[in-house]
């Protein structure tokens, strides 16, 4: 995996690009001189967790031939200062899923993702407690 990063506007507006040419703008908070023109790096990490686990959950449900009519995830993350860095301490995901399936099927898909398949979750669990809840939308 290769990523390119370049500064596009001083002081902190940065453009990242992956090998496929997809680009994301990153910025810092206004408190340190950023312009709020893109997510901060730690926000991208949490977005990655939501995306990684979602891809797993959707794939697991699709393999069971389950139609997903609507899907979303909300993430609430809490950081804690450790030495000079602020690491994630608690991360809570709330999955909202609509489709033709049973509650146990959704729970199992989420469990498999967070406990076995999602590389981002496996990375973050070394410093943070990851919890979740889910809601079946009628």
Image (cartoon, helix red, strand yellow):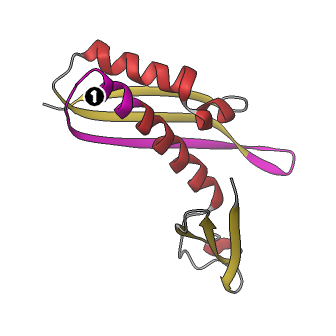
Q: Which residue is at the front of the view, 46 or 84? A: 46
- Say above or below: 9 vs 89: below
* Name of the residue lying farthest toward the left: 138
- Residue 59: quadrant of the picture: top left
Q: Dot 1 lies on which element? A: strand
The residue at 55%/63% (across/down) is 20
Q: Mark 1 packing: few (<14 Cα in 10 Å), some, or many (20+)?
A: few
Residue at (61% x, 34% y) in the render: 119
Q: Position of residue 83 (x, y in %)?
A: 87, 45
Which residue is outermost to the top? 104
Question: Residue extending furthest right?
Answer: 83
Q: Position of residue 70 (x, y in %)?
A: 21, 41
Q: Position of residue 124 (x, y in %)?
A: 66, 35
Q: Quadrant of residue 104?
A: top left
For the point 37% across and 41% down, the residue is 73
User: Is residue 125 left or right of 106 when viewed as pictured?
Assistant: right
Q: Quadrant of the C terminus?
A: top left
The residue at the point 40 percent across, 43 percent down is: 74
Q: Which residues are magenta?
A: 57-86
Front position in the image: 124 or 63: 63
Is residue 69 toward the left or the right of residue 74 in the image?
A: left
For the residue pair 41 and 15, the one nearer the viewer reads as: 15
Residue 84: say if magenta. yes
Left or right: residue 7 compared with residue 74: right
Percent coordinates x, y for residue 29 in the rendering: 62, 70
Residue at numbered disc 1: 135
Magenta-span inclusion, residue 67: yes
The answer to which quarter of the image holds residue 14 is bottom right
State how many labels appear. 1
């Amino acid at each position: 995996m290769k990523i390119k990063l370049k500064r596009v506007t001083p002081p902190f507006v940065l453009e990242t690009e992956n090998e496929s040419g997809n680009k994301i703008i990153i910025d810092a908070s206004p408190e340190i001189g950023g312009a709020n023109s893109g997510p901060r790096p730690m926000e991208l990490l949490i977005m990655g967790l939501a995306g990684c686990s979602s891809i797993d959950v959707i794939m697991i449900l699709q393999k069971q031939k389950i139609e997903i009519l609507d899907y979303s995830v909300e993430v609430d993350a809490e950081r804690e200062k450790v030495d000079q860095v602020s690491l994630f301490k608690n991360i809570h995901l709330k999955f909202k899923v609509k489709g033709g399936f049973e509650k146990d099927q959704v729970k199992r898909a989420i469990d498999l993702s967070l406990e076995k398949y999602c590389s981002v979750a496996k990375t973050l669990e070394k410093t943070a407690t990851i919890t979740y809840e889910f809601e079946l939308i009628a």
